[in-house]
Amino acid sequence: MAENVSTKEFKKESGLKSGSVLEVFYPFNLDKDRNRVYIASFPKIVFMWPTILCLLTCAIVQMIQDVEISTTLGWVFITVFSVNWLIIAQDFPRLKFIILCLIILLLLLLVWVVDLKTVTILEDVQDFLKSLKPGLTDHSYIIMFVILTALFFWGMSSPLVDHWRFENNEFIHFVRPFGRDQSIPRMGHSVTMEVSDVFEFLLCGAASIVIRKGNEVVARIENVPFAPRKMKVIDKIIGELKVRHAE
């Protein structure tokens, strides 16, 4: 009881603002002092937004252009879709990301060298790829766009049910409608950010928020979008508490 009174007095004296649970999607008002911030782990479907955007673009272009462009649009969609699924299927930390870039550069260099030597096998591969017609109708693009968009928003709704609230004196895990699932006291714990996948970080600033007690990992919240922005709020909250205890 004394702890709750102390927390209320601290909020009143410092003039801190309470955040909204909707900030699991994007944290606003970072320039203001806060007494809490909401963090949630998002499903991998949120990283499919490039494919969803590509489907919508291909559908629109296919409807206003003639049929001859359908093959080009098909290749564009296949490329975006394949790269997007590669990002979801595999984690690419910094080392693996660098290795992948080097492999791509080596393959491009190999293709260039083979092309200079006019190797016939490369021409055969090019002729085979040109013979493929991976075009889709505008209706196909629209149907896939609707399906993926529905799954996307379904996944986006899950953090409203399962999320964390970081406060000045504790970190609380909520599972709606049951309420508190776990509570971790602020004292003795540290919070850090880890980028486990470079591509996911580039897509929407996604990273993992890790709560530690010494060298022990107490909780790991993965796939947190806009993690650097949320870490700014967390650092402010922790900083305010440290100043409070120092006084």
Image (cartoon, grey):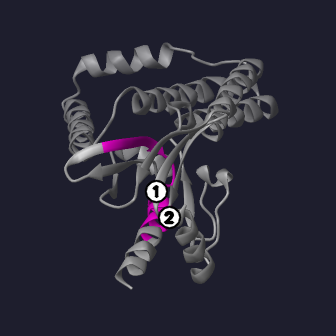
In terms of secondary structure, where does tag 1 sit?
strand
Q: Amino acid at mark 1?
A: Glu
Residue 28 location, x and y as percent? 63, 65
Nearer the observer, 102 or 160: 160
Tell me the residue at 24%/41% (across/down): 105
Q: Are marks 1 and 2 in contact (CB under 8 Å)?
A: no
Judged by depth in the image, the label closer to the viewer, 1 or 2, is 2
Mark 2 — residue?
A: 3
Of pointers 1 and 2, the one earlier in the residue sequence: 2
Residue 78 location, x and y as percent? 52, 25
Mark 1 — residue?
A: 170
Nearer the observer, 32 or 66: 32
Location of the N terminus by quadrant is bottom right
Q: Is residue 135 depicted above or below 34 in this figure?
A: above
Quarter where residue 133 is shown: top right
- The residues tagged by marks 1 and 2 sit, at their Cα atoms, a distance apart of 11 Å
Q: Residue 229 colored magenta? A: yes
Q: Is residue 2 depicted above or below 21 in this figure?
A: below
Tell me the residue at 63%/55% (across/down): 23
Nearer the observer, 154 or 8: 8
In terms of secondary structure, where does tag 2 sit?
helix
Q: Is residue 50 visible?
A: no
Quarter where residue 100 is shown: top left
Residue situated furthest right in the rendering? 64
In the rendered structure, which segment of residues is drawn in magenta? Answer: 218-235
Residue situated furthest bottom in the rendering? 247
